[in-house]
Amino acid sequence: MSYIFKFKNNQKYTLIIGILIILFTSYVVNAKSAPETFADLAEKLSPSVVNISTTTIVQQKSREMPSFPPGSPFEEFFKQFDKPENKKRRAQSLGSGFIIDKSGYVITNNHVIDNAEKIMVVLYDDTSFEATVVGKDPKTDVALLKIDPKKIKLKAVKFGNSNNLRVGDWVMAIGNPFGFGGTVTAGIVSARGRNLSGSYDDYIQTDASINRGNSGGPLFDMKGNVVGINTAIFSQSGGSVGIGFAVSSNLAKQVTDQLKKYGRTKRGWLGVLIQEISDEIAESLGMKDARGALVSSATAGGPAEKAGVKTGDVIIKFNNTEIKNMKELPKVVASTPVGKSVPLVILRNGKELTLNVTLGELELAEKENLIGQTSKKNVKAKEYDKLGFTAEELSDQNKNKFKLNDIKTGVVITSVKDDSSAQKAGLSPGMVIIRVGQIEVNSMDVIDNAIKNAVKQKRKALLLLVKVESGTRFVALELK
């Protein structure tokens, strides 16, 4: 009794113990342990997930008939088997989707409905509706459909912020694998920011089972928000092996908002061809580390050229967002509204410069075939001669030899020594030299000075810009 009485009167210890109890209780309540069940979440969200059935006209190749002389009885006999109406057939396919608006907007993958003649959306209770395509985006594999629910009350789900996901967080997928209808699987986020093949890829990798037919279905977090659109699997057998990919909700929401508003996407366009900065290229530019995106050319009359961007510039920030590597720039640019003026921070000759660029529209640039067109002021002549190759000024003879009829100025590599720095860097006869470092070359003196300066600064490589068949690219030439 004396111990209890003494403890009650000791306010200091009582306060400390009280705080510890509160903190421990809060930790237990908020600890992210494995949920006991996904049943409540699945029951709540399943009515928002739909099955999508499509009918597609498939061109079927007819069987080749034996060849016989004209007028032969065998020719007439085999003609009866070559029926033109059999060259087309209807194919059925199944996928998944989810409702994002009670008025009838449904999201799925573009590959689920691509080239479909008829699209049917089947609700959780087997009620079906014919859908129309509002818009689709092959680049991100996202499509927006619309159904008329009439008097039926649809249950919609909301997008969550996929940037808040952490590797190891629990997620749940609902879809229509192999046509079995509503199926629930669960797992964790295995990785974020995966790039499979596209410039705008932003995939969430998960080990929640995703199979054929799950495409277009939602990936939920534990709050019931859509954090991804189940899109692809990695498999050698065609079935789930625990590696699935979902388009991130932040990217999907951005795309679907544009599809809903315009019926198509409107991406920001900067107008540059870029390449990754390797350690060798970074060293040749005097950079402490490899970062940013290296501009190999700017589109003639494009937003970047108008803003003052030049070949050889390194873009390190776009609209106040740091560009850590080349793959980040297209995503950031595409997500920026068309016509918006934004700051662009570049690295030129070792100094940071800030330019203001007004973005164009990527889809319009593609329509007008502007992508990849280089400015004449960015394709000036360059020549060099002392690092394992020889070069000549352009002449009718070497222009004909290397098929350089469209090249008016510059120098051309005519030979490359075996086991030389030039060969190791990938240089070959027929390449046209444009720049050394970030300096335009108009004489051999410029090349000699560039080499001397690089040696004085103890650089291990010299940066060259060369014209190749596919465009222009930078090469880091090792200095021995």
Image (cartoon, rainbow, N blue to C red):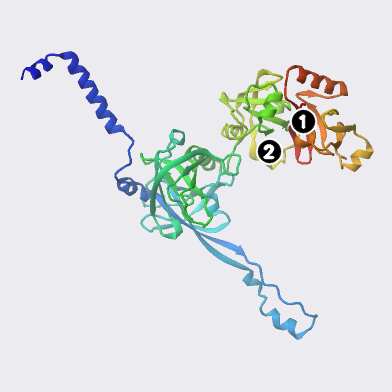
Q: Is residue 297 left or right of residue 201?
A: right
Q: Examine the rendered structure and indicate whether residue 92 appears above or below residue 253.
A: below
Q: Identify the element where label 1 is drawn.
A: strand
The numbered dot on residue 465 is 1
Check whether the beta carbons of the residues at disc 1 and disc 2 lie within 8 A of each other.
no
Percent from the top left, x then y, of residue 268?
61, 34
Q: Is residue 155 left or right of residue 366?
A: left
Amino acid at dot 1: Leu
Q: What label sits on residue 4 in the rendered view?
A: none
Q: Nearer the viewer, residue 147 or 304?
A: 304
The kind of residue tagged 2 is: Ala
Number of residues whose C-alpha sits closer than 10 Å to that of mark 2, classed few (under 14), some (14–19) or many (20 or more): some
Given the current orientation, which residue lies at the most extreme bottom position? 73
Residue 333 horizontal side relative to residue 223, left or right: right
The C terminus is located in which quarter? top right
Q: Nearer the viewer, residue 136 or 450?
A: 450
- The residue lying toward the viewer, choosing from 370 and 31, is 31
Residue 382 in picture, x, y percent from top left: 83, 28
Q: Of marks 1 and 2, which one's residue comes earlier in the chain?
A: 2
Label tally: 2
Residue 52 to residue 5: above or below: below
In the rendering, at what x and y percent does residue 271 appear?
68, 33
Q: Position of residue 404 (x, y in %)?
A: 86, 40
Instruction: Give the quadrant of residue 386.
Output: top right
Residue at 66%, 67% in the rendered image:
61
Query: Residue 365 has which mark?
Result: 2
How far apart are the two marked residues, 1 and 2, measured between alpha carbons?
25 Å
